[in-house]
Image: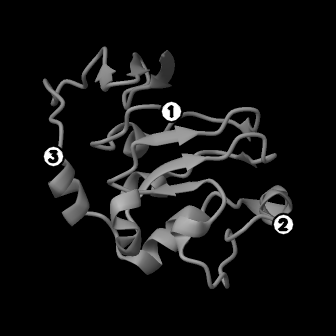
Amino acid sequence: RTTTFNKPSHNHSTTLKTTITQSSIQPEHYPPHTKTRSKMSPNRALSQRPKVSNQKNILLTLIQGSPGKLWSDGIVGWDPHSAYSVCFWDGVICDPLRRDAEIITGLILPQKNVAATLPTELGLLHTLAEIDMPRNGIYGTIPSEIAALPLLEAV
């Protein structure tokens, strides 16, 4: 599956077009200072992932304002005071072989009435490979921090 998003570039006179496919993210126009996109190894991505408590706070940035409180009520986790590991939150997928390490690999939140932008903080989840949030009220552009995730395969 291929999805193309247009994003304004830093100088606002050109548009940065990013094509997201199942296997990679390939910018079709690089900023002048960037000629290639390096792919980070999975082991390096693991070493750069945030601490467990920070992962929880990063995920909680999806809860934005009153609409955020509405969609997050009544589903497992998604509360700052939740005692559950993020790997047991609704819609959060973790590496099944290393669940105790809380390695987040996906956000799957279909039809949850999420009304939000994709927060730049999600770009700190270096092991994130998939963001799947169909039939929600997601608006705005995909932040460059998310588009640059080393293991991201699908949005």
Q: Give the residue drawn at x 40%, y 20%.
A: 21
Q: Classify mark 3: helix, strand or loop.
A: loop
Q: Residue 74 carries which label?
A: 2
Kindly identify the amino acid type of the residue bearing the numbered disc 3. Ser
Of the image marks 1 and 2, the number of the one nearer the N terminus: 2
Q: Give the residue drawn at x 31%, y 14%.
A: 28
Q: Residues within 10 Å of mark 1 (few under 14, many from 20)?
A: many
Q: Pick the residue in front: 29 or 45.
A: 45
Q: Classify mark 1: helix, strand or loop.
A: loop
Quadrant of the image occupied by residue 151:
top left
Of the image marks 3 and 1, the number of the one nearer the N terminus: 3
Kindly identify the amino acid type of the residue bearing the numbered disc 2. Gly
**From what the image shows, is residue 12 above or below residue 38?**
above
Q: Where is residue 10 in the image (x, y as percent from the top left)?
A: 37, 32
Quadrant of the image occupied by residue 79:
bottom right
Q: Mark 3 points at which residue?
A: 41
State the separation of the CA atoms marked 3 and 1.
Answer: 20 Å
Q: Name the residue under label 1.
A: 155
Q: Give the residue drawn at x 72%, y 68%.
A: 76
Kindly identify the amino acid type of the residue bearing the numbered disc 1. Val
**From what the image shows, is residue 74 above or below residue 79?**
above
Q: Residues within 10 Å of mark 3 (few under 14, many from 20)?
A: few
State the separation of the CA atoms marked 2 and 3.
Answer: 37 Å
Q: Where is residue 89 in the image (x, y as percent from the top left)?
A: 62, 65
Q: Give the residue drawn at x 15%, y 46%.
A: 41
Q: How crowded is mark 2: few (under 14 residues within 10 Å), some or many (20 or more)?
A: few
State the separation of the CA atoms marked 1 and 2.
Answer: 25 Å
